[in-house]
Image (cartoon, rainbow, N blue to C red):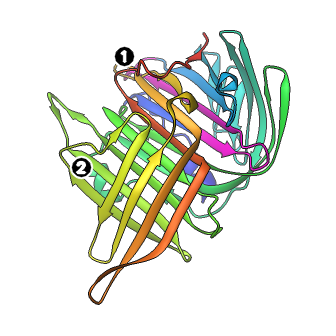
């Protein structure tokens, strides 16, 4: 259930990082919104909370911006079943996220509700938690949720009605070295969803190969495709998909123009930040094939324009991404 998989996992004896996030694209205006609330700290130290939020405008890049605020103890508190986290003026709990943050001349405020209690989707298969991406776990309690409420960006309020999005929960000993993630929904087939992640972690002086996990909800069931590769298949704003198993294959692209990305600094428990380049107005074109007699036959073409939520992240900030989530 969503409530159980959203409950805080933070253990001061271990340290690490933990975050909750909500992404949504409004179907009427085409605008996207992202809020990420979390904490990070070393073992035995008091952690600090942080909020990152961004608004994405589909036709005017100058109106795309992000804000960020940090809150050392006691300005944040972990909660329980009724409220997972409060940090600064922001809080997230079962079915709601509300708050505000400001920076670099911008201000965002949000009061959003999301449908809950659908079955949790685990972005990484269980084996990955013991292997290639063992530094992090990603539970998606609300994998394809309907979002309602309002977002106020620089004094202008957007009413969100029946927005499509996702609410997830990330926790672990530390951030991966680099990763790309995407949530693709809002297809003509209302039940179809694609959840995708690829990334690598550092093991001492070594980097693991890139582990890719693609989940496709198709005709009421989940299909998971995984791959381990030495070379990455992405660059900033672009990700080429080609993953196959004995029965299925998915190929295509997930992408976003550079002006649609906001760069956010995410603190790490090891003192080394990661730089996340996020959008909620990306696009995808993905073909799903099923093996039949004589080879693979295409069974679905999943296209989304301006409705894809995605991010490209790593140790190095991209100089091409000019929009920064700024603040204190």
Q: Is residue 29 magenta?
A: yes
Front residue of 253/246: it is: 253
Q: Which residues are magenta?
A: 21-45
Q: Nearer the viewer, residue 44 or 196?
A: 196
Q: Is residue 247 above or below residue 314?
A: below
Q: Residue 31 at x, y = what percent?
A: 71, 39
Which image quadrant for residue 24?
top right
Q: Earlier in the sequence, mark 2 or mark 1?
A: 2
Q: Is residue 158 above or below residue 2?
A: above
Quadrant of image for the N terminus:
bottom right
Residue 122 seen in this snapshot: no
Instruction: Indicate which disc residue 271 carries.
Output: 1
Give left or right: position of 83 versus 212.
right
Q: Which mark is residue 131?
A: 2
Q: Nearer the viewer, residue 20 or 256?
A: 256
SS assignment at label 2: loop
Apparent side of residue 201 relative to residue 65 in the rendered image (left or right): left
- Foreground residue among 124 and 265: 265
Which residue in the rendered view is the most extreme toward the bottom?
293
Q: With respect to residue 294, does 323 lie above or below?
A: above
Q: Quadrant of residue 327?
A: top right
Q: Position of residue 322 (x, y in %)?
A: 52, 18
Q: Which structural element holds mark 1?
A: loop
Where residue 281 sits, quadrant-wise, is top right
Q: Quadrant of the C terminus?
A: top right
Badge 1: how crowded within 10 Å, few (<14), some, or many (20+)?
A: few
Disc 2 to disc 1, C-alpha distance? 23 Å
User: Where is residue 128 drawn, in percent x and y?
Assistant: 30, 53
Dot 2 crowding, Cα within 10 Å, few <14, some 14–19, many 20+? few
Magenta segment includes 231 = no
- Residue at x-position 40% and y-position 57%: 252
């Amino acid at each position: 259930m969503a409530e159980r998989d959203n409950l805080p996992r933070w253990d001061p004896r271990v340290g690490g990082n933990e975050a909750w996030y909500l992404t949504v694209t409004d179907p009427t205006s085409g605008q996207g919104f992202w809020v990420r609330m979390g904490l990070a700290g070393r073992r035995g130290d008091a952690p600090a909370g942080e909020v990152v939020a961004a608004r994405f405008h589909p036709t005017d890049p100058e109106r795309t911006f992000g804000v960020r605020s940090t809150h050392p103890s006691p300005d944040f508190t972990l909660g329980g079943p009724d409220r997972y986290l409060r940090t600064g003026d922001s809080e997230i709990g079962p079915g709601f996220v509300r708050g505000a943050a400001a920076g670099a001349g911008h201000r965002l405020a949000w009061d959003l509700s999301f449908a809950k209690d659908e079955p949790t989707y685990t972005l990484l298969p269980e084996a990955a938690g013991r292997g290639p991406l063992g530094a992090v776990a990603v539970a998606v309690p609300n994998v394809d949720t309907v979002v309602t409420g309002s977002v106020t960006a620089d004094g202008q309020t957007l009413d969100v009605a029946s927005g499509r999005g996702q609410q997830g929960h990330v926790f672990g000993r530390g951030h991966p070295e680099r990763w790309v993630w995407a949530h693709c929904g809002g297809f003509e087939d209302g039940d179809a969803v694609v959840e995708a992640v690829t990334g690598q972690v550092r093991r001492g002086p070594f980097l693991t190969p890139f582990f890719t996990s693609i989940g496709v909800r198709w005709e009421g069931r989940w299909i998971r495709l995984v791959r381990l590769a030495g070379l990455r298949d992405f660059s900033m704003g672009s990700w080429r998909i080609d993953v196959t198993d004995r029965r299925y294959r998915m190929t295509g692209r997930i992408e976003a123009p550079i002006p649609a990305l906001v760069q956010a600094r995410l603190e790490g428990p090891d003192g080394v930040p990661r730089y996340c380049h996020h959008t909620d107005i990306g696009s995808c074109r993905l073909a799903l094939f099923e093996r039949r007699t004589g080879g693979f036959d295409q069974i679905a073409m999943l296209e989304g324009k301006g409705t894809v939520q995605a991010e490209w992240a790593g140790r190095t900030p991209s100089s091409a991404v000019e929009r920064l989530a700024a603040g204190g």
